[in-house]
Image (spheres, grey):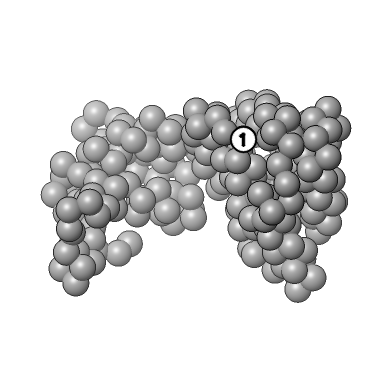
């Protein structure tokens, strides 16, 4: 884990720049999502503060944010613990996330955007195709995450986008672990293009139906892998 004090020595904080709490929050969150802090990992606040080179106050505030996002739990006198996920957790996450994204797709399609309005979404799909062509699963996953993030951010409902982002983060570790255990996700790329074209046509019914089936298939695939490979928690 990077020492934030060293970062701030070379690049001191200025008015309007990122706060120390935000830096600690992003660093800890990255460690959780990348599985550097594995499921069930525990650490005391003083240990985290020392490793990051900051006082306990920004660590405490960052941990409260991460607890609100259901990535960790705070245990009295035992510090923080990374919350493990079981297959039933993933089912719940995908059920809610699917509903949110389907709503976002409908809102976006009803706006009847032009192709240039969705240039970033198109680029994300192109990047997914390019990654699969070289069997770059990590590159594909990054582009896939980007597509889903842009999809909800483009619908115009900020509260929906915030809720969807939190749920994607909760499920990120499971997707990371199962990435190379699944079949090559060529169907996923086609689904994304079909959803995008329906949105551009203003056909919100086709767009939402296609996206719902896409998300349902993704959830079934992930949960099946967790059960088949006997991964009890992530």
The picture places residue 63, in percent across and down from the top left corner, at 30, 39
What x and y, as percent, mark residue 162?
49, 34
Say if residue 125 shows up in the picture. yes
Left or right, 85 with reference to 223: left
Residue pointed to by mark 1: 155
Q: Nearer the viewer, residue 90 or 114?
A: 114
Compared across the picture, whether 180 is left or right of 56 comes to: right
Residue at point 71%, 42% (across, down): 113
Identify the secondary structure beneath mark 1.
Answer: loop
Residue 119: name its quadrant.
bottom right
For residue 139, above or below residue 162: below
Residue 7 in the image: state x and y as whole percent: 23, 66
Judged left or right of residue 94, residue 45 is left
- Tell me if residue 188 can be seen: no
Q: Residue at x 74, y 51 (%)?
A: 115
Residue 222 coordinates in the image, percent (x, y)? 72, 42
* Looking at the image, residue 198 lies above or below residue 193: above
């Amino acid at each position: 884990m990077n020492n934030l004090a060293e970062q701030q020595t070379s690049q001191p904080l200025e008015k309007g720049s990122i706060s120390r709490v935000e830096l600690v929050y992003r660093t800890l969150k990255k460690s959780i999502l990348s599985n550097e802090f594995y499921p069930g990992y525990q650490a005391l606040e003083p240990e985290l503060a020392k490793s990051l080179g900051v006082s306990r106050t920004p660590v405490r505030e960052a941990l409260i944010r991460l607890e609100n996002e259901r990535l960790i739990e705070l245990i009295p006198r035992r510090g923080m613990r990374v919350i493990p996920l079981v297959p039933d957790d993933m089912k719940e996450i995908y059920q809610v996330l699917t509903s949110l994204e389907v709503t976002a797709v409908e809102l976006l399609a009803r706006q009847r955007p032009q192709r240039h309005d969705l240039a970033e979404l198109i680029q994300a799909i192109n990047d997914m195709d390019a990654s699969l062509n070289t069997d770059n699963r990590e590159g594909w996953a990054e582009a896939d995450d980007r597509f889903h993030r842009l999809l909800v951010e483009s619908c115009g409902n900020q509260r929906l986008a915030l809720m969807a982002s939190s749920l994607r983060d909760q499920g990120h570790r499971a997707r990371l672990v199962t990435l190379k255990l699944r079949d090559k996700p060529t169907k996923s790329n086609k689904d994304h293009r079909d959803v995008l074209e329906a949105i551009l046509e203003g056909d919100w019914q086709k767009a939402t139906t296609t996206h719902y089936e896409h998300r349902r298939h993704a959830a079934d695939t992930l949960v099946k892998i967790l059960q088949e490979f006997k991964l009890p928690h992530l």
